[in-house]
Amino acid sequence: MRRRVAAAALEIFAGWSYREIDVPLLDYFDQLREVMEPSEANRTFRLMDRDGNLLVLRSDVTPAIARSYAHQLQGVPLPLRVCYANKVVRLQRAFTREQSESYQLGVELIGATGMIPEVEVLLICLEVLQALRVPSYQVNLGHVGIYRRLLALAAVPRAHGRGLQEAIARRDAAEVRGIGLRLGLREEAVEAFAALAALAGGERQLDAVAAIYPHDEILQAACKHLRGVAATLAALGHGERVHLELGLVDGPTYYTGLSFRIVARQSGRALGGGGRYDDLIGMFGPLTAAVGFALQLDVLMGLLYPAASSELSELEAPSGAAVRVEPQRLVEGFAAAVERRRRGEVARIVARSGGAPVRSEERS
Amino acid sequence: MSESNLPRLRLALPKGRLTERTLDFLRGVGLPIEAEITRSRRLLHDISAATVEPLGCRLEVLLIKNTDVPVYVEHGVADIGVVGTDALYEADVEVYRPWTFPYGSCDIALAAPAGVDAGTLRRRPWLRVATKYKRYARDHFAGRGVSAEIIPLSGSVELAPTLGLADAILDLVETGQTLRENGLEVVEVVGRTEVKLIANRALSTPAAEAVERLILRLSGAAEGR
């Protein structure tokens, strides 16, 4: 099932002209640590190579692709469209040490700025979710630039940004106000951050934030940009599934603009997420704009499982497929099976010892 | 809008010290919840009659163990819940926590047999601490560079020092009565727990708006106190 889901996603990616690429499983920790949050770094698996270098097992595909683009794919014509279904290894929860090997399915669109590539990857993402018939999913759409601009406008000291970010990510407006008071922020700044922490996002939230600094061009541009992406998706029939959510400030640190996260009611963990990362490739090579997303296959499988198990029966070989092979007549038996395969038919080998079929085989 | 079109929410309430208090508080903000809920042994109650009018949503209440509330909400079995930050920290879940209740807050303290002070504890080469809050304890001691053995218990933690199972305990302290009766004293207050309204991260817009209406009512009542 897992492979069928991955294959369905890759087919859709290919349908949007994305080429599959592979990235290394092992990487040097020193190089990736700079683009990782400490909490994210804590969830990685690290090991030593024979020379004593610290290696890390791939926990996120995007930085690996950024790196391979910066080092190997230089000179290819832009924009570059790549996709992948790759294994990642990370601890899900640092405390319980719950460990997880999973697949990330995703695309990266490298070398394109503006709204168009963002709408493109969002449409691909929505098509995959739709095609897989994921129940009750929702794409929360935010813009890291809005939060970062508010931080700059309020002159929040870098060291205190973390607590504020956590409180917003938890939608804890009281805590946000408390932190604002302790830092001695101006009232309008506190209100702006509290607005980010509102539980129900939507146009209303965007209006509220935009109205606090009506003359700040950077903030207004970011708001307008986000509004434009949401309106385009709504006009294309995705209004029900796409929600504005400015409290989305806790994604990977490498995001620089639009960001989104796919959630579903029945799943505690996010199904996936994406966003614009214009600085990440620049950390390894020449500055190049990019946008992408990834879905977590294990979370998807958890949601799809009830539906998937009923589809499993379709996969079982049809009843006429059994080909009996006896130890005394191996060649004839297998020849019949090979002949069926040559005709493009399904074959299922049933081994017979002497006359009677083997019990366990029969049961399967 | 007809009643069947209204968003339907499920609220997880912790069984125990917070149940009555929370229900009373909800009644106080204009949700006439029947007393039946805590009298019967049923664990799932439809209280839509009390919420359709003031909140514009239907509501089911489920009563579960407090440490399970975060898990139910994270997995979307319940949309919202009421739980202390102590249990929330232990569960390590990803949920929203949009509101803080004005009651149920208490200290998290390190306590030891009477006469033992912080200095004595700190000088121990190997400190044994019994607690129900092992994640909190581990992070607290790790943050201070104290090597401590965390002894996880699920109740009657106060017994541990008396019986020699641990040198100290880390627990919630409300009045300090239980501590005194077991010959223990607070050595140091290390944190504080609050009661939070928590919410699943994938609420639909109508559901999230209903929760916001609830919060508005709760805040109004809290300020009027």
Image (cartoon, helix red, strand yellow):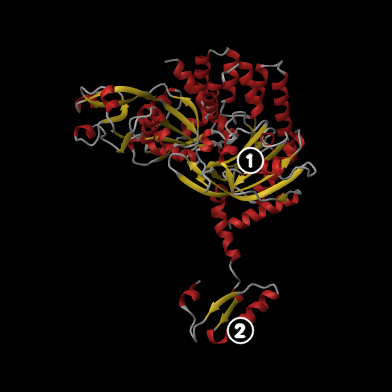
- Residue A327 place in picture, x, y as percent: 53, 84
Q: Is residue A357 above or below residue B19?
A: below
- Give the crowd class for mark 1: few <14, some 14-19, many >=20 residues within 10 Å: many
Both marks 1 and 2 on one chain: yes
Mark on residue B186? none
Residue closer to the observer: A236 or B116: B116
Q: Secondary structure at mark 2?
A: helix
Snapshot quadrant of residue A260:
top right
Amino acid type at mark 1: Pro
Using the numbered discs, state the Cα–Cα distance from disc 1 to disc 2 in whole angstroms. 52 Å
- The mark that comes first in sequence, 1 or 2, is 1
Instruction: Give the chain letter at badge 2.
Output: A
| Badge 1 vs badge 2, beta-carbon distance below 8 Å | no
Regarding residue B21, the answer to whether it shows in the image is: yes
Q: Which residue is mark 2?
A: A331
Q: Is residue A6 above or below residue B22?
A: below
Dividing the image into 4 quarters, which one contains the C terminus of chain B?
top left
Q: Which residue is mark 1?
A: A63
In the image, is B71 to the left or to the right of A113? left
- Residue A67 place in picture, x, y as percent: 66, 41
Name the residue at 57% across, 26% down.
A198
Amino acid type at mark 2: Val
Q: Is residue B122 above or below residue A55?
A: above
- Residue A214 place in picture, x, y as percent: 70, 16
Instruction: Give the chain letter at badge 1.
Output: A
Residue closer to the observer: A245 or A237: A245
Name the residue at 52% across, 33% down.
A38
Snapshot quadrant of residue A156:
top right
